[in-house]
Structures are given as structure tokens and as C-alpha cells.
Image (spheres, rainbow, N blue to C red):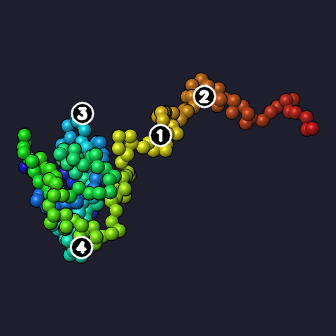
Amino acid sequence: MASDQFDEPDETIGIRLNPRDIIGHLVMVWATDYIPHSPTRHTKPGKPSDVIVVDVVDLDQVDELGQPGLLARQVWWRQVKLIMALKGRIGKPTPILAKMGQGKATQGLPPFELFSMTSDAGCVQRANAWLTAHPDFTPSARGEQNGEQPHWGDQEEQPAWSKANPNPQPEVYSPPAVAPQETMLERMARQAAQGASRLPTRPDQQTAPF
């Protein structure tokens, strides 16, 4: 069975809003972070695999209380057009109000795109209704990656140990010292000396008792 029939696991923790699953939905989108390279099995050598991280409110779905507007935080989108549209808006407090759609295909599948709905009074009214109902909502701060280690954009923070020792040297294994082997002649001489030390001394060789 061909492996391209299957998707990679979604990095998003919690509610997922995959662009292909919300085509035609009215959404509010806050761009919260950008990851320059997070490779998957589809990543080609030498080619970056970047990600835009977003908070999304899908106004065509309901939340866990059955109210209009399903909020999904820290969603990873890898689609090129979406990254291009949102990368310059990272950290801005006002969202994009748009419908998820697909543009014209130049090669392969049609790209996912966000089509602005700010000129539609009905869409604006729905968005304002959600914002009014959630006055305490704030977009995720940059670097909040669902409890995981934060991504630092183009300049990734080095861990403390690498700052203290930027060029660590590998430990060199030293085998334990081995005592030199005793030759046969040395062993015979030692045994003879040990035997001689156990022999009684002659009276004329005894030392004085003082």
C-alpha cells in the first residue's frame, strides 16, 4: 500500500483545524509564531519546511458549550499561501476575518488561501458577537508551543550548557592499566627467594637478641 495515502501526525495539541477540513468556513485568525524549519518525511533535502502557528476561531462550528465559535490555539499550518499571508501579522492583536478557500492550481492541488470577509456586514457582525462574548480572550504569546520548548524563530536559543562550553570535547576512554606480565625467569627467582626466606638460619647467622 502506498505511503502517500497517509498524513503525518499533526503537531497541534488539542483542537485541530486543518485547512482542508474548514473550506468555506468563516474564521478569525491570529498569527502567533513562525517556525523556519520543522521537517517531516515529505521534506526534501536542502529545502526549508516552515510553519505558521495560529490561534483560530471557526465561527461555523460550536464550542464545548454549544456556543458559536470553536477556538483552537497554537495550530500549525504548513501551506505556503497561508504562511505568506500570515507571517507578517505575527503578534498583532487584531485578527484576520476571512473564509478558508482554495485558489487556482498552477501545479498539483489548488493552494489553500484566506479570502477576506471584512466587507461583508453579516460576517463582521458574527465576528464582533464572538469577541463581545469573550472579552477576556487574548491571543497566545509568541513562543508558547503547547507546553513544549518554545521556538525562537531564525535564531534558536542555545541551551545553557552549550553557552558555557561552546566547543565541548568528547570524553576519551582510557582502558585500565594492566600490570606487566612476569617472565618465567622472574617467577622462578621470586619463588626461590620466597623459599629461602622460609628456611631456618644457621646459628652463626642468627642476629643478636637486642
Q: Is residue 12 visible?
A: no
- Residue 121 versus residue 199: which sits nearer the camera? 121
Label ID, residue 64: 4
Residue at 19% in and 60% down: 27
Eye-nearest disc, 1 or 4: 4
Q: CA distance from mark 2 to mark 1?
A: 54 Å
- The answer to which image quadrant residue 196 occupies is top right
Query: Marks 2 and 3, Cα distance to the nearest angstrom?
Result: 67 Å
Q: Amino acid at mark 4?
A: Glu
Residue bearing mark 3: 46
Whether label 3 touches label 1, CB < 8 Å: no
Between disc 3 and disc 1, whose residue precedes? 3
Relative height, residue 107 to residue 95 (above, below): above
CA gap, disc 3 and disc 1: 25 Å
Q: Is residue 177 visible?
A: yes
- At 23% across and 55% down in the image, what residue appears? 96
User: In the image, is 176 to the left or to the right of 14?
Assistant: right
Q: Which residue is mark 1?
A: 162
